Image (cartoon, grey):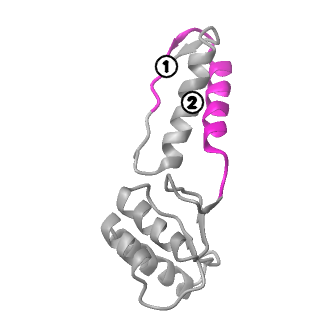
Amino acid sequence: MILVRPETTFFSRLYAALARIAATLDAAAIANRIARPQARRAGLILAVPDHPLIQAALAKVHAEGIPVIQIVTRAQGTNAIYVGIDNYAAGRTAAHFLSRMQPQNGTVIALCHSQVYQVHRERIRGFSDYLEDRPGDGVSS
């Protein structure tokens, strides 16, 4: 779903309503909507958490021949097309710049608000791998 920026009352209210609906969906509800649609569909465009129930629902949809595109987030083990950045490279890049900005050696702790999204895990992995590969760059993980 693509929405214009919520500068008007209508689009602001529409965006808020969609956000409220999305917040009520847990992994089981999302998987159920993916696997058992209420209407016929030609394809799916999703931004969903990486969860075994969702992975199974996506495998079912793939087996049915329905095209799936995952945007921004990705569920592991799926054959869906992914549209988004290379999160591993983004994590490595962040570690590179952080290590260059530090005036002295020190310890770094990388925090991630949630591990339910594979893309977050990829960024943390890239960040940690960079620091592990270059222990003399000024910081350590």
SS state under label 1: loop
Which labelled disc corresponds to residue 16?
none
Label 1 belongs to which residue? 141
Which corner quadrant of the image does residue 74 belong to? Answer: bottom right
- The quarter of the image holding the N terminus is bottom right
**Magenta segment, which residues?**
83-110
- The first of marks 2 and 1 along the sequence is 2
Give the left or right position of residue 84, taking residue 120 as reference: right
Give the left or right position of residue 5, taking residue 52 as reference: right
Which corner quadrant of the image does residue 79 belong to? Answer: bottom right
Give the left or right position of residue 5, taking residue 117 as reference: right
- Residue 18, x across and y down, in percent: 45, 78
Label 2 belongs to which residue? 127
- Residue 59, x across and y down, in percent: 47, 65
- Residue 32, x across and y down, in percent: 35, 75
Amino acid type, residue under disc 1 in the picture: Ser
Up/down of 102 relative to 57, above or below: above
Residue at screen point 45% across, 71% down? 60
User: Which is nearer the eye, 41 or 27?
Assistant: 41
The residue carrying pointer 1 sits among few (fewer than 14), some (14 to 19) or many (20 or more) residues within 10 Å by Cα, namely some
Q: Does the magenta stretch include residue 32?
A: no
The residue carrying pointer 2 sits among few (fewer than 14), some (14 to 19) or many (20 or more) residues within 10 Å by Cα, namely many
SS state under label 2: helix
Up/down of 64 relative to 76, above or below: below
- Residue 43, x across and y down, in percent: 59, 79
Q: Is residue 98 magenta?
A: yes
Residue at screen point 67% across, 50% down? 85
* Cα–Cα span, label 2 and label 1: 9 Å
